[in-house]
Amino acid sequence: MTSWTKESLKGLSGEAELLAGALSQTYQLFLRALDYPDEEHCQWIREGGLADPLRLGLAAISPALEQPDERWAALRGSYSADDLAVEYTRLFDAGASGPPCPLYGGLYGGARMKTMEEAVRFYNHFGLTLSEKQRELPDHIATQLEFLHYLTYREAEALQSGGDAGPYQRAQRDFVARHPGAWLPKLCVRLENEKAHPFFLALFGCLADLLAHERARLGEAT
């Protein structure tokens, strides 16, 4: 996406600001975790670059999101790039009729064009556009996480400055409910059925739990 900047928020205070800041950082962390697992990426995982801040971020959002220990072990395992790359391709990229676990939400609801058009309307409403250079698609999980990162960043910024955070909160509520929060559970079922690598089971399990938590919280608050 384009048309916004991502300077680090500083000086957050108060429960609402800190929550929005923790959400923004956590969505960004999930976004990085979805990068193709080359050797540099796997080294980052082995050294706790994912598991340690993710655990802190989820705990800051809600103690209910503290995950079982086996998930954290899976998220910082000593994996080789070959191990994760082969599995990444098998699950998300390969298959004569498409991968068994696609990362495109529109493939889980039977009306992909409508799903993508609706997602684009969300993005355009906030002045965001998809990068043609990177060939982003509006229903890909990375695009949707970047949007949630943006919304929570702007929410924190508005709360910090005394502005109106309502539009960003309502957009999160509607977008999570209609897009990633609706299809991530279906992806998790497919990952289980495919006996996916523990790393991907743990990663998407944590993300699905976060989205379910946010769907409930935002539905009650707005």
Image (spheres, rainbow, N blue to C red):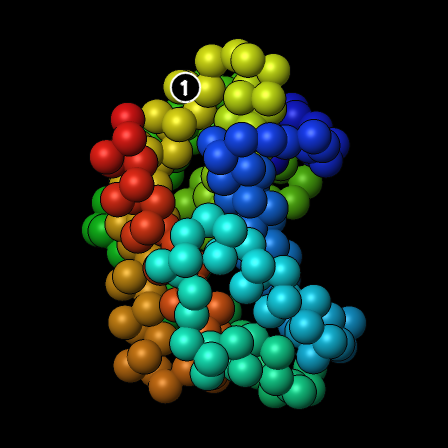
Residue 202 drawn above or below residue 116: below
Residue 182 relative to residue 24: left or right: left
Above or below: residue 19 compared with residue 163: below
Q: Position of residue 192 (x, y in %)?
A: 32, 79
Amino acid of disc 1: Pro
Image coordinates for residue 124, horizontal then vertical, percent: 47, 22
Farthest residue, direction right? 40
Q: Is residue 37 left or right of residue 74?
A: right
Decide which of 82, 164 is in the foreground and name it: 164
Please name the residue shown 73% across and 71% down the image. Answer: 44
Q: Nearer the viewer, residue 189 or 24?
A: 24
Residue occupying the point 41% across, 45% down: 139
Quarter of the C terminus within the rendering: top left
Asked which quadrant contains residue 204, the reply is bottom left
Residue 15 lies, in percent from the top left, at 49, 35
Frontmost residue, 99 versus 59: 59
* Spot occupied by residue 89 in the image (x, y as percentages of width and height): 53, 75
Instruction: Look at the image and tell me whether residue 76 can be seen.
Output: yes
- Position of 126 relative to 74 (above/below): above
Rendered-image quadrant of the N terminus: top right
Residue under the point 39% across and 33% down: 172
* Residue at x 36%, y 59% (from the top left corner): 64
Point out the residue furthest to the top here: 163
Q: Is residue 172 left or right of residue 135?
A: left
Q: Residues within 10 Å of mark 1 (few under 14, many from 20)?
A: few
Residue placed farthest to the front in the image? Answer: 14
For disc 1, the marked residue is 167
Quadrant of the rendered image containing residue 55:
bottom right
Q: Secondary structure at mark 1?
A: helix
**In the displayed structure image, the side of residue 189 where residue 168 appears, left or right:** right
Work out whether residue 90 can be spotted: no
